[in-house]
Amino acid sequence: MFKTEVIRLCFCYNNSMKQSIIFQRLEGFTLLVVSIFVYVNLNLNIFVFILALLLVDIFMAGYLINNKVGAYIYNVGHSISIPLVIGAAGYYTGSGMTIAVSLIWFAHIGMDRAFGYGLKLESGFKNTHLGHIGKK
């Protein structure tokens, strides 16, 4: 009896973990779509958007030092907090360029999360809060 309870508990835990990851990936997709929608509706330059979308990955440079520094720097750059503050500052000052930077940054974070590239763990680049990236 104890063995079946443990198996059932593990099964439920794994399902709830998978469900939470699916929700987080859908949330990322939503962030991507809404960022693009707002960017386009503000009549901002779509070519700049496309060219700058991957610039946020400059935060991967920390991995040139080691996994711990890399994870920290990557996570700072892929946190929603920074583009949120930048977007609020852009709104407050009326700076279209600042708002554009914020929306591009949000879109990048949303794209990463939608594809399963979550915040990094110190154990290595492929280990994220959304699970392992690629084949083990």
Image (cartoon, rainbow, N blue to C red):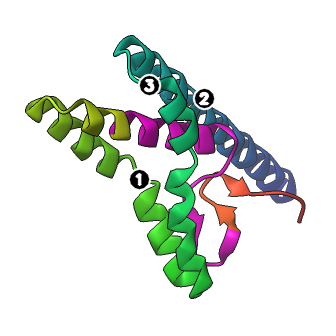
Q: Secondary structure at mark 2?
A: helix
Q: Which residues are magenta?
A: 102-125
First of labels 3, 2 by sequence position: 2
Horizontal side of 43 relative to 119 (left or right) equals left
Residue type (three-letter) at the residue carrying disc 2 = Leu
Front-most of 56 and 11?
Answer: 56
Q: Position of residue 102 (x, y in %)?
A: 34, 39
Other residues around mark 2 within 10 Å, as few (<14) / some (14–19) / many (≥20): some
Q: Which residue is mark 3?
A: 45
Looking at the rendered image, the disc whose residue lies closer to the viewer, 2 or 1, is 1
At label 1, which amino acid type do we have? Answer: Ser
Q: Is residue 107 in the magenta section?
A: yes
Which mark, by number, is residue 69?
none
User: Distance from label 3 to label 2 (Cα)?
Assistant: 26 Å
Residue 28 is drawn in which quadrant?
top right
Please name the residue that numbered disc 1 is placed on: 79
